Image: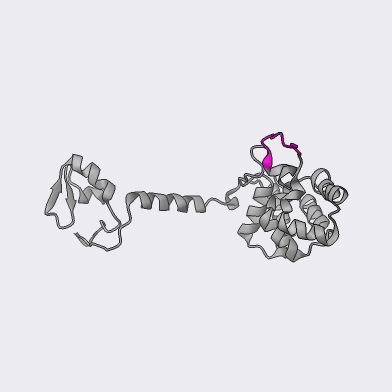
Amino acid sequence: MLGHLLAPSLFIFDSGTHRFSSTDFKVAALHITSSDVKVSGDFLPSPIGVSCTSLLSSRKGKVHSTTNTNNLSLVDEERKTWDACKQALSTFNFSIEEEDKILGKAFGLVHSPYWGEDRNKEVPEFDLVNGILNYLRSLNLSDEDLTKVLKKFPEVLGCSLEDEIKNNVAVLEKQWGIKGKSLRNLLLRNPKVLGFNIDCKGDCMAQCTRCWVRF
């Protein structure tokens, strides 16, 4: 279309009464708006103008928004395992996209600042995911509670059940006397405590997202 709109060294603007040199065109191009579209041989002015920068930003946003876990490169067996894990989440009435995002963040397939650069990408196993969900239910968390926990802290499904989750629950009870209803309330408010695995004791180790100093 630009081939018809632009002469080799001229930029025709609106009615064609104004002409710019090729140098002027480089400057004028910065101010092209969405109204500068040729329709039926004429330029139709519009009161709404969108700058080239805005259009480019919008286009980038659209490209970014289409990137999701449906595009993961999974072989057949991995896809079956992935779908089985999504089935474990089906009781919480998440959308398909939300299930993918939760598992993706938990297992390093979707970027999460929580892990930093430490999380290896892996396909989750059904028994692992289901085991964590069942353990959390044993802490008097209802499915409605777990829905809130998973929305706040999807990475919990990628934490170690024995070394982190169970250990941290034991620490909360032993050191702070937090259990039962108090534990439930804490987990609803700050479920990330389940994944703490370091205590810098004030001497920062640059792993703040997983440090007890945040508790």
Q: Position of residue 10 (x, y in %)?
A: 16, 45
Q: Nearer the viewer, residue 83 or 60?
A: 60
Q: Is residue 115 magenta?
A: no
Report the residue at 47% width, 50% height from top: 63
Q: Nearer the viewer, residue 133 or 165?
A: 165
Q: Nearer the viewer, residue 161 or 66?
A: 161
Q: Give the magenta part as a residue range.
A: 199-208
Q: Is any atom of residue 26 visible in this view?
A: yes
Q: Position of residue 45 (x, y in %)?
A: 23, 62
**Whether residue 164 is situated above or below residue 87 in the rendered picture:** above
Q: Nearer the viewer, residue 80 or 53?
A: 53
Report the residue at 32% width, 52% height from top: 51
Asked which colour scheme the image uses, the reply is one colour
Q: Position of residue 197 (x, y in %)?
A: 76, 41
Report the residue at 69% width, 53% height from top: 153
Q: Main secondary structure of the magenta part?
A: loop
Q: Quadrant of residue 160?
A: top right
Direction from residue 61 to residue 79 in the image, left or right: right
Direction from residue 143 to residue 101 in the image, left or right: left
Q: Is residue 207 magenta?
A: yes
